[in-house]
Amino acid sequence: MLPINTLQAACDSYRHWIDRENSPYSDLAYRDTANRRDWLKQASLTALAAGSLWTSLAESLALANSKNNSNASGRPKSMIVLWMQGGPSQLETFDPHPNGSIGGSTIAINTSLKGLQIANTLSQTAEVMHLGTLVRSMVSKEGDHERATYNMKTGWRPDPTLVHPAIGSVLCHQSPHNIEIPRHISILSDQWPSRGGYLGSQFDAFQIGDPKNPLPNLKSPIPASQFDQRVADLEILEKGFRKGRLKNLETEKTLHTLSTQRAIKMMSSDQIQAFDIDREPASIRDPFGDTPFGRGCLAAVRLIEQGVTCVEIELSGWDTHIENHSLQSGRCAILDPALASLIRLLEDRDLLDSTVVLCSGEFGRTPKINIADGRDHWPVGFSSAIFGGPFRRGYVHGQTTHELMPADQDPIAGVSKPVKIEDLHATILHGFGIDPAVESVTPIGRPLAVSQGSIVEELFEA
C-alpha cells in the first residue's frame, strides 16, 4: 500500500500541465506581459464554466508574469517558521519592561546588539540578536486563537468564501518543484497546520512529528518484486481511467498518477535521510536541547540543505491566562537553546543568507496582569523576530509604551512604527523576490493578489 501522507505530499500542481513539452500552451508563458494579462482576464471568466484546468492555466500565466519581472539574484531560497502557538508574551521574551507597571517579574538582560535588551528567559538568543531584525510593533485585529493563527500564517483575515494559502505554500507555488521530498513541511503541527488554500491541497504542509521517530509508511511491507508488480497493475487501471479522457495516454497524466509517481520517488530517494537527525554528531544535536522542538529545528537545517522551501516547527503552550511568568519561562527554556542553535548552525553552514527565519506567534499578551497572575490575549504591539536573508542585521523596529494605556484610549497609540500582519507578509515575499501584488486565480475564477500588505522597506539592508 502506498503511504497516504507521502501521496498527499507528492502531489504537484495542475499548473505544471502547461510546462509539458507537448502542451499546446507551453509557449504562452513567454508572451509579452500585456497579452498574458489580457488572456488571464478571459481565463478567469472561462474558469467558472471550464473547471480547474483553465483556472490552473491562468494561474500559471500569472506566475510566469511574476517571475519574468523579478530579479532572483541573491534572493533567499528557504524559510523556517518557528511557530509559537498560543500567543507568547512579548514582555517575557523580546520586549521586557522591567520595574514598571506592566513588567511583572521579568528581568531584562543585554544582548549582542548594543543598546538592545530582551528578557532573561532568552539568554542564549541574546547572544545572536546582532544577526536579527526585531519587530516590536506587530499589530493585528484578531484576538481569537484560530482567527489570529489564520491571519498570521496567511497574511489575510478569515473569509468564509475562501481559504487563503499559508506563506510557505505561496513560496512553493512561486518556485519550481525540483526535489524528491516535500518542499513544504510542518513539524509538530497541532490544530491548524499550514494549508495550500485555494492554491490546492498539493501545497499543504507535509506533517511529521518528533524527528527522533522515523517517518511512517516509507518502506513497503511486501517484497520489491511484488511492489513493482502492484505499481504496474495500478498503471493499467490508470490507463483505463484516462482512456477517452486524454488525447495522449503516454504523455498526459492525471493528478493521481503524478501523485503516485512522486510518492514512489520519495520512498526511494536518498534525500529522505534529511529527516534523520541522528546522522548529525552529538556535538551538533545537543545544543538544540533534548526536546521535540529542538530536534525539529535541527531537522529544519538538514531539510533546507536538501532544497526544501519552507519548514514550520511548532511550539505550543503559550496561552498563559494563569501563572503567566512561570509558564512563559517554561516555554522559553525550550525555545531559547533551539532558536540560538538554529541561527548559529545556519551561519556556520553558510545558509543564513539564503534562509529567512521567522519566530512569532499569533498575538502577544496583555500589559495588565489579571487576577489569576496571567496575561490575556493582546494583538497590539507584540513581537516577531526575523533572521537571515536580506533582512537587516542588528536592527530593532518599533517600540511599545512602558505604561498601561487608559481604558478609553486606543491601544495602538502606545505603539510606534506599527507593522500590520499583511505588511509583514508583503515584506517577506518581497525579500524572496516575489511581487506581493502578483495575482493568482482562485477556483471560482477570482484574480487575487498574494498579499494585500505594503512593504516595510526599513526592515531590509540598505
Image (tube, rainbow, N blue to C red):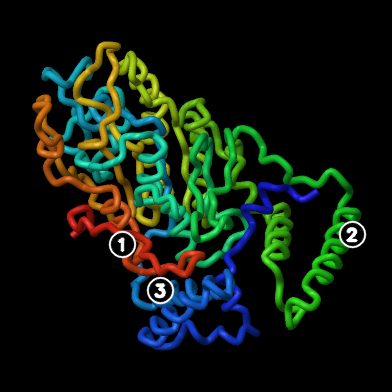
Q: Which residue is mark 1?
A: 430
- Secondary structure beneath dot 1 equals helix
Q: Residues within 10 Å of mark 2 (few under 14, many from 20)?
A: few
Residue in the image at 41% along x and 79% along y: 41
Q: Earlier in the sequence, mark 3 or mark 1?
A: 3
- Secondary structure beneath dot 3 equals helix
The foreground one among 281 and 33 is 33
Residue type at mark 3 is Lys
* Residue 77 image-quadrant placement: bottom left
Find the distance from the CA under tag 3 to the CA under tag 2: 41 Å
Q: Which residue is mark 3?
A: 67
Q: Is residue 436 left or right of residue 224?
A: left
- The x, y position of residue 398, in whole percent, is 15, 42
Residue type at mark 2 is Gln
- The x, y position of residue 69, in whole percent, is 34, 76
- The x, y position of residue 286, in whole percent, is 49, 29
Q: Which residue is mark 2?
A: 229
Q: Earlier in the sequence, mark 2 or mark 1?
A: 2
The foreground one among 298 and 286 is 298
307 is higher (above) or lower (below) than 336: below
Residue 433 visible from this viewpoint: yes
Residue type at mark 1 is His
